[in-house]
């Protein structure tokens, strides 16, 4: 049984946040999304680049594309994955949870600092 505490809640929340962003948005995992999603870059009139996604295929391929295109959907599955891994293999999963949680907290701090320095 999982130990329920505020610490564990925050640990899993930040770990799931980071894993979800890694799968849905980060360039390093583009190869995972590539069989399911086309990422189309369009140059806007102001010169900025906007990236749009187009889901590929049908059936299972389309379903996985929909999943990887939806931050909320992927978040549910990454959380379930982390919880199951922790339940079945807690000693192996703990380092992964800490790594992802620390990276998630660092990403939040970087976003906050970035907003302050823009102003």
Image: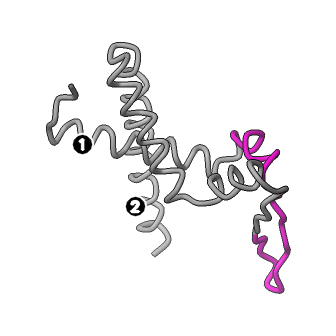
Picture layout, residue 93 above or below residue 78: above
Residue lying at the far left in this picture: please name it: 5
Q: Magenta stretch containing residue 111, yes or no?
A: no
Q: Which of 103 and 52 is in front in this view?
A: 52
Instruction: Quadrant for the N terminus, please.
Output: top left
Q: Position of residue 65 (x, y in %)?
A: 71, 54
Q: Are marks 2 and 1 in contact (CB under 8 Å)?
A: no
Q: Magenta stretch containing residue 29, yes or no?
A: yes
Q: Residue at x 69, y 54 (%)?
A: 63
Residue lying at the far bottom in this picture: please name it: 45
Q: Which of 112 and 31 is in front in this view?
A: 31
Query: Left or right of 11: which side holds 112?
Result: right
Q: How crowded is mark 2: few (under 14 residues within 10 Å), some or many (20 or more)?
A: few
Q: Nearer the viewer, residue 3 or 99?
A: 3
Q: State the mark number for residue 84.
A: none
Quarter of the view holding residue 95: top left
Q: Residue at x 23, y 36 (%)?
A: 8
Label 2 vs label 1: CA separation?
Answer: 22 Å
Q: Residue at x 41, y 33 (%)?
A: 82
Instruction: Quadrant for the C terminus, please.
Output: bottom left
Circle 2 SS class? helix
Q: Residue at x 32, y 24 (%)?
A: 87
Q: Mark 1 points at which residue?
A: 9
Q: Nearer the viewer, residue 24 or 88?
A: 88
**Segment tinted magenta in the rendering:** 28-50
Query: Left or right of 53: which side holds 76?
Result: left
Number of numbered tags placed on the structure image: 2
Q: Name the residue under label 2.
A: 112
Q: Position of residue 64 (x, y in %)?
A: 68, 49
Picture layout, residue 3 above or below residue 46: above
Circle 1 SS class? helix
């Amino acid at each position: 049984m999982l130990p329920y505490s505020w610490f564990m809640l925050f640990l899993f929340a930040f770990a799931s946040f980071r894993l979800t962003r890694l799968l849905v948005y980060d360039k390093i995992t583009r190869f995972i999304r590539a069989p399911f999603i086309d990422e189309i870059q369009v140059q806007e009139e102001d010169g900025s680049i906007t990236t749009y996604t187009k889901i590929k295929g049908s059936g299972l391929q389309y379903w996985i594309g929909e999943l990887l295109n939806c931050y909320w959907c992927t978040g549910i599955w990454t959380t379930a994955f982390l919880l199951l891994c922790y339940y079945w293999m807690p000693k192996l999963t703990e380092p992964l949870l800490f790594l992802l949680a620390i990276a998630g907290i660092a990403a939040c701090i970087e976003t906050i600092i970035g907003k302050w320095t823009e102003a």
